Each structure stands twice: as C-alpha cells, then as structure tokens.
Image: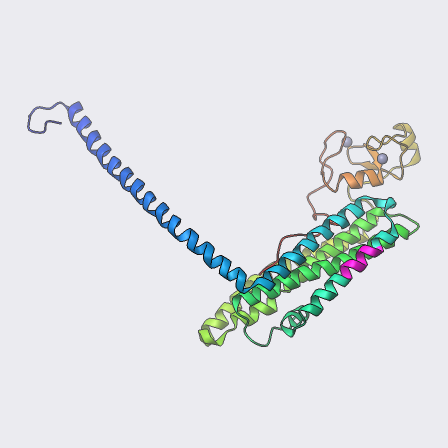
Amino acid sequence: MNEGIPHTSNSDVERDDAARVGGASNRDASYHRHYIQQATRWIEQVLPFSLLLLLIFIRQHLQGFFIIIWISAVMFKSNDIIRKQTSLKGEKKTVVLMCYSLIFMVHVVVVRWWYWNDNLLHPMIMVPPKAVPPFWHAVFIIMVNDILVRQAAMVLKCVLLIYYKNSKAHNFRRQGQMLTVVEYWLLLYRAVLPAPVWYRFFLNKEYGGLFSSLMTGLYLTFKLTSIVEKVQFFIASIKALSQKEVHYGAYATSELVIAEGDMCAICQEKMRSPIRLCCKHLFCEDCVSEWFERERTCPLCRALVKPTDLVSFADGSTSLLFQLF
Ligand SMILES: [Zn+2]
Ligand SMILES: [Zn+2]
C-alpha cells in the first residue's frame, strides 16, 4: 500500500501483491465484459440482415423449398403409418395396406415426373451429373433422391406386410427380420447415393487439377469407410435371417412349459410357441420378440439376455435422418 515506508512486514508485501494481481484481473474482467458487449451489439446488427438474406434465398428457391418440405412431410407421415400397421400384427387389413402402397407409389412417380431431369436420375444409377452442379443444386438433388428412395422402400415394406399377413404361418418374427434387412439395404444404398453428385462437385477443374483430385480422393476415402460399415450391417442383417434359433433363447419342451405353469408373464395367457431365455424364464415367442425390439433384459428378472447387436427395424420404421454426404 504505502510503498514509501520502509520496514513493511512480509504480510504487508503479500497483501500488496494480491491487490495488484486483483487489479489486473479486474481490468481483464472489465475488458472481457466490454468485448462481450461489443460482440452482442455486432450480432444484433448482423442478425436482422441475415434474416433478410435468408428470406431472399427462400424466395429465389421457393419451388425447391416447397417440394422438399412437402415430400419430407409425406415421408414422415408414411413412416408413422407403416409403424402403426406393423404394430397391428395379425389384425392389419390387406386392402388398407394395398391402398397405402398405391398412394406411396403414385406419390413417388408424380414427384419424379414433375422433376423429370437427368441430374436427378443419373445419381440413382451411380452416374455423376454431366455438369458440375452449384452447391445448392447438389444439396437439392441429394435431398430429393434421399427422400424418394425412402418413400419407394416404404412401398416394398407394405408389400412385405401384406405377404406376412396372408402367409399361413403368421411368422411375425420373420417379418421383422425382413423389414430390418430392407432397412439396412436402404441405409447402404442411401449412403452411396450422394457419392456421384459430390464426386462431380469436388472434381471441379476450376480449382486446379491437383487440388480437385486431392479433394475428390479425400471425399471418396471418407465415403468408402462409411460404406464398408453399412455393408457389414447389411450382411449381419442377412445372416440373422438364416438363424432358425431365436438368438436370445431356445424353444422350450412341453414338459418344461407344464412344469413352469403354462402362463406367459407378458400376455397373461397360455404360452404360444414358448421360448426359454438363458435366465430360464419362459415367454411366448411373439411376446418376447416384441419385448426385445426395445429392451435387452428379461422382463421378469432383468438379466441381460440380448447382447448388443444390430439395431432392429422390426417395427417397420425408416431412419428419418438425411444422408447428405
Ligand atoms: Zn405371451
Ligand atoms: Zn429372467
């Protein structure tokens, strides 16, 4: 404090230092506060302007925005419909399913016909567009294809539902496995779908041959790693088809069922094709496979029964995330 006075005690010096450090940090704090105020004011000024630019952008691409919002909405709704129909199991109506698949099909065809151009069609068969697409065109092409492919796959899912509804065996476990295979095939195809468009986009000679080749190479490397993963999932889902045994237990003998008391704890009725889990609890096959669509443990004792494996799409759902890259 009073630096002129000699013989200050040690504690005085320490307090002095502390005060000086405190002053510095105060200055820092006020500087930061000032900086944050400036930044906030800057954002306040920029925000309305960017909103205006966004409105202009939407106005310039009005039809594109409209079509993307419309086909996404139809796809989201269709996903709900298919999940609901799948959960009905034996009670679903063939006529209703046929109507839905017809509507989905007509929707895909009409949108395709409305947007009939090669830039949209070529990437579907892995042919890059002829000209380098501007960035927003590339995004548009990829989004429309990504949504329409899912909508078309929903027609296939409807057909599967109709088939298993009318098959004599009423094997809804197999139906779930088939739905899962279709969804993994779809995820794989959708992962490949943007590749031709971005390939053409990156391979733009305007940036210089070396740079564009480097960018394209890097993109294709990234793409390849994600595709390898998707292929593995697809193969795993096909392998699951050939498993006759349920992978979380085995069919129980009739003696076992009688010994355990012939009642399923899930549906509270007589066992239908009972399954014995590794924790020795018995349940109907349909009940327990429905349970394991969401859970991994036994409904009674909470023992871990189902190992982490493939995510199941047995409920008929379709991944709603957009595959843009
Ligand atoms: Zn049951
Ligand atoms: Zn158990």
Residue 220 visible, this angle: no
Measuring from the top left, give residue 273's x and y in whole percent. Answer: 89, 40
Closest to the observer: 293 or 133? 133
Give the magenta-colored segment's residue range: 98-105
Magenta span has 100?
yes
Measuring from the top left, give residue 18's x and y in whole percent. Answer: 22, 30
Considering the whole magenta stretch, tell me its main secondary structure.
helix
Please state, as top left, top right, bottom left or bottom right, where the C terminus lies in the image.
bottom right
Name which residue lies at 83% across and 50% down.
Answer: 174
Measuring from the top left, give residue 300's x and y in whole percent. Answer: 77, 29
Name which residue lies at 56% across and 76% down.
Answer: 131
Measuring from the top left, give residue 204's x and y in whole percent. Answer: 50, 74
Residue 61 image-quadrant placement: bottom right
- Please determine whether, in this image, residue 217 is positioned above or below residue 9: below
Q: What kind of colouring is applied to the model shown?
A: rainbow
Say left or right for 249 vs 141. right
Say left or right for 1 vs 40. left
Say left or right for 146 vs 270. left
- Please determine whether, in this image, residue 270 is positioned above or below residue 205: above
Name which residue lies at 60% across and 69% down.
Answer: 196
Please state, as top left, top right, bottom left or bottom right, where the N terminus lies in the image.
top left
Looking at the rendering, the quadrant in which ligand 1 lies is top right
Name which residue lies at 53% across and 60% down.
Answer: 58
Residue 175 visible, this angle: yes
Magenta span has 1?
no
